[in-house]
Amino acid sequence: MSHAHRPRQHGRIGMALVLGLITALVLVLLPGAAEAKGKGKKVGHTLNVMTRNMYLGADLNPALQASGIDGAVNAAYQIEQQVHATKFPSVRAALLAKEIQKQRPDVVGLQEAAWWRTGPYDLSAVTGGPKATQTDPQGGDFLTDLMSALNAKGGKGKKGTASAAKKGGNVQYRIAVVKPEFDFELPVNQGTGGLSACGTPGVCHNERLTMRDAILVRKGVKTSNPTSGTFNTLLRVKVGGVLNVDVTRGWAATDVKLHGRKVHVVDSHLEAFDGNSSNSSNTGQTYPKGGIREAQAKELLSGPAVSKLPTLLIGDFNSDVPAHGDQVTPGDTLAYQALLNGGFSERSLTPPPFGCCIQDPNLANPSTAGITHRVDHIMSNSKKIRFKKGALTSTYANGLWSSDHYGLASQLLIK
């Protein structure tokens, strides 16, 4: 009788073994099921974002505030000497590249990506449009110089690979979109004599500044729909008190795909020079202090920031709110408040710490006494984008700061 029950006992053991194997196979084939059981729902993937104002290399105010064309030409020499002293090609490009490589962002928004070019003396370039085409070797093409430093050989592991990232090697970057903006050219003398000094052959030459915003992405990050545009509302200045020049500013945008998530990224640099009580614009309208950058912020909200995707606004907005403890005046809050009113909120470290500004236009003074506020921001209007952690980045080395304000980096969670 007892022997008669043995086949049934073996049957139970066999059935249990089969069920166990099936369960194990399901867990192997469907690891998400085990993860959901042990950890709950997946919360998303990380996207590392950075915004970096590169500092164009000089203070332009001497030329913008000159009382006559001779004063503007004299000031152009001062500006050129300052650009050469801040050494972007030979020093600062490498400093900024190291900051980016340390943070290893997937997306980088750049502002003041200047391009300094030189050419023979030609007064017609002032009124007829820029003509110089040769890169000033001491001034530099900031984008080319930075990309060369970023993608230079070095580090451990094969460049641009996952093993390189794990082993600390360089991460490779590419330009996803670039937006040319303010573009102006002036004669440069030897610091005195105005235009009359240019009557002597060989004394004068032309120097051209082209400003740009750009978005970089790490190798392996997919992008689509690159777009850019110019703001309708621009600051109008009188160079030398006689020549109307519109300060062209705008935005660059692209859709970014990483880990199966898509995000719409907009990078911009809002007006920095509308600090007077009354500021002229290209439309003929006069704006109060900070009013032009406020108008530009509202253009972002109604234009490039509109997307079916979760949107990130990154850049130098030259604005913040006193609630952060910043030392700002009321006009400086207008643009940031407009973005808050438009549904965007911060996705970065809450100030303090602050990141602006180095007070020496030559970048040589190591003092941080003037860093009293925040103008750089990483913002979103979507609950699908959450802030995890962040950092401020800056470097003082070889007798120079990497820029006149700190960079801002955030690790974001994308649901």
Image (cartoon, rainbow, N blue to C red):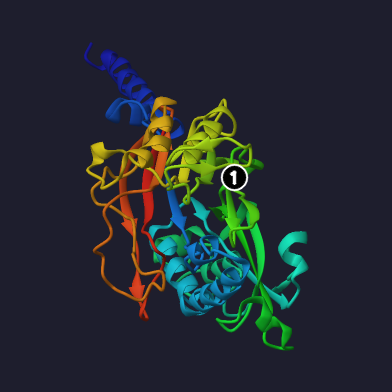
Residue 215 position within the rendered picture, expressed as x and y whole percent measured from the top left:
56, 51
How many numbered circles does the render carry?
1
Q: Residue visible at 22% across and 43% down?
A: 325
Q: Residue visible at 74% across and 60% down?
A: 127
Residue 209 position within the rendered picture, expressed as x and y whole percent measured from the top left:
62, 65
* 207 to 213, vertically: above or below: below
* 346 to 16, vertically: above or below: below
Q: Secondary structure at mark 1?
A: strand
Viewer-closest of 169 and 105: 105
Whether residue 263 can be seen here = no
Q: Residue visible at 72% across and 76% down?
A: 119
Q: Which residue is mark 1?
A: 250
Q: Residue visible at 51% across and 76% down?
A: 78
Query: Is residue 82 shown left or right of residue 393?
Result: right
Amino acid at pointer 1: Gly
Specify the quadrant of the image occupied by residue 200: bottom right
Q: Name the image quarter holding the N terminus.
A: top left
Query: Is residue 411 shown left or right of residue 240?
Result: left
* 26 to 86, vertically: above or below: above
Mark 1 neighbour class, 10 Å CA radius: few under 14, some 14 to 19, many 20 or more: many
Viewer-closest of 3 and 251: 251
Query: Is residue 61 shown left or right of residue 240?
Result: left
Q: Name the image quarter holding the C terminus.
A: top left
